[in-house]
Amino acid sequence: MLSTSDLPAVNASLNAISTIFISAGWYFIRRNFWQRHVACMITAIISSTLFLVGYLTYHAQVGEKSSGYRGWLATIYFPMLASHVLLAFVTLPLVILTLVPVFQRRWDKHRRIARWTMPIWLYVSVTGVLVYLMLYQWFPPPSLAQPR
């Protein structure tokens, strides 16, 4: 059974899955394999949705954890975190705006919006994994460090 403390790793895994399928979906659509593209994007949407549920669940129970980083680590971590969070707020509406024309079979509009959505969504999913790795694996601050 999963505990709350497992959610950051699960969420990072879901972000990594999203990264893989967003990238594969882009690869397939660039080569006109639209059926494979659709399968990849559905998987990316499901993975991202599960991530969002896990993220909200975790933070509703635990609250926000300040990293306490200083020096060169703070110089790298905080700008990445800030851009990740700001663009994460943009991603959900962009994904929805990208999906609506699909259901209307407006491929031209879908393509136009997807050109913006894909790189932003990809950036958010990649930086989500990096934030997790920095915070929980590579450089855990004393407040998050767990004895091994």
Image (spheres, grey):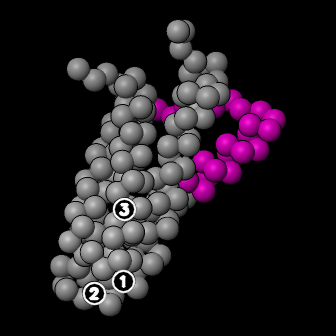
Mark pair 1, 3: CA separation = 16 Å
Magenta highlight: main SS? helix
In the rendering, which numbered label is found on residue 24? 3
Labels 1 and 3: the sequence-earlier one: 3
Residue 131: x and y in percent read 56, 41
In this view of the protein, can residue 56 be seen by the observer?
no
Task: Find the residue positioned furthest to the right.
Answer: 71
Q: Residues within 10 Å of mark 3 (few under 14, many from 20)?
A: some
CA separation in Å, label 2 and label 3 = 19 Å
| Residue at image point 25% right, 75% down | 34
Residue 93 drawn at (x, y percent):
37, 68
Contact between marks 1 and 3 (CB within 8 A): the answer is no
**Residue at the image point whose x is 68% and y is 29% from the top:** 68
Q: Residue at x 26, y 56 (%)?
A: 43
| Residue 117 sits inside the magenta stretch | no
Would you place residue 139 above or below residue 110 in this image?
above
Mark toward the start of the polypeptide (2 vs 3): 3
**94 or 148, nearer to the observer:** 148
Question: How far across and down, in percent of the image, does residue 30 sit?
Answer: 38, 77
Q: Residues within 10 Å of mark 1 (few under 14, many from 20)?
A: some
Check contact, mark 2 vs mark 1: CB within 8 A.
Answer: yes
Cα separation, mark 2 vs mark 1, equals: 6 Å
Q: Which residues are magenta?
A: 63-84
| Residue at numbered disc 2 | 107
Closer to viewer: mark 2 or mark 3? 3
Q: Secondary structure at mark 1?
A: helix
Which residue in the structure is indicated by mark 1?
111
